[in-house]
Amino acid sequence: MIDLAFGIKKRMQKNPITGELSGKTLGMIFEKSSTRTRVSFEVGMYQLGGHALFLSSNDTQLGRGEPLKDTARVLSSMVDMVMIRTYKQSDLEEFASYSKVPVINALTDSFHPLQLMADYMTMVEFGKDKEPVVAYVGDGNNMAHSWLYLAAKLGFELRVATPKGYEVDKSILDEALVLANKSGAKIAILNDPKEAVKEADVVTTDTWVSMGQEDEKERRLKDFSGFMVDSSMMSLAKDDAIFLHCLPAYRGYEVSEEVIESHSQEVFREAENRLHAQKGIMVWLDNKRG
Ligand code: CP
Ligand code: NVA
């Protein structure tokens, strides 16, 4: 998928309209907000010659209680692929089990795999894909879980530092460790951000308050004290370390203004790569279906 994404990105420089998915349609179900995911899929599908439909749960019958399994059977009789951004991972899996067409995980409470495709592309472009040491500092959330899978699949070293009580999910970690055994990935679970960042090639973080956790905001902001990636934290990493953030970023909380602005080259390339990664995924799925 990533090879396809890089190929499409290169071809796009001459002409963004490539047309591989001419006549194809993508249904996009959003039960949570989005800027990057929505725009990259909509623009990506247009540039590939297809059409994307934005289906917010507020404006569809999903919001009035139509079961996911019915929506899955209806939509998949009309569109060629579906992407869903929702809360429970089990809802996405239920949808997929009733769908006749491929279903793409566009973020759940548990995972954000699309983001890691773009993050890895950015690591490659900044020369950080050869045995990198990656430090994830912050909440043991969907981003942390997807980093676990990326490291475990590709076999690199990942150190995840969270405050006590905000560690990654144990069963997801166990699954990642099984994969890591095969790939040779080294995964460390820590509570000290400085230990994680020491001599790292890539430092990354994410919001302390994910979508759906708004009620916990006050407590979380207190509990995450000391976990902001600021200049003194970055100075512990290698001199040429890159900083990644899936965005949106909350300056003064998980990252300082200075760090995000001094690493804006990486962070906004990472955001742009969402477009190319999305296209790689859609073309791959279409090729697979024949
Ligand atoms: N990073 C990311 O998924 O951004 P959006 O929530 O804006 O889609
Ligand atoms: N962890 C964040 C990621 C946003 C792209 C959330 O789920 O809200």
Image (cartoon, rainbow, N blue to C red):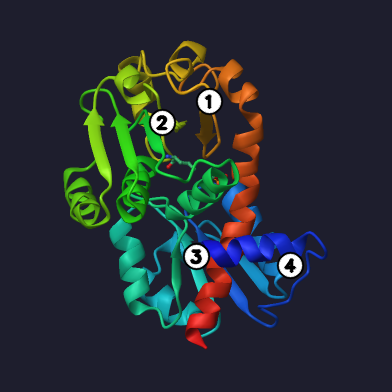
Q: Quadrant of residue 65?
A: bottom left
| First of labels 2, 3 by sequence position | 3
Whether ligand 2 has any atom under 8 Å from the Cβ at mark 2 is answered as yes
| First of labels 4, 1 by sequence position | 4
Cα separation between marks 3 and 1: 26 Å
The residue that disc 2 covers is 209
Q: Which residue is more in the foreground, 31 or 196?
A: 196
Picture residue at 38% right of the left edge, 52% below the top: 108
Identified by mark 3, the residue type is: Met
The residue that disc 4 covers is 47
Picture residue at 58% right of the left edge, 73% below the top: 283
- Crowding near pointer 1: few (<14 within 10 Å), some, many (20+)? some
Query: Given contact means CB atoms under 8 Å apart, are the residues at marks 2 and 1 in contact?
Result: yes
| First of labels 2, 1 by sequence position | 2
The residue that disc 3 covers is 83
Point out residue 89 in the picture as x, y percentages from the top left corner: 32, 57
The residue that disc 1 covers is 250
Q: Quadrant of ligand 1?
A: top right
Q: Which residue is more in the foreground, 139 or 179?
A: 179
Give the secondary structure at mark 3: strand
Q: Is residue 44 above or below residue 229?
A: below
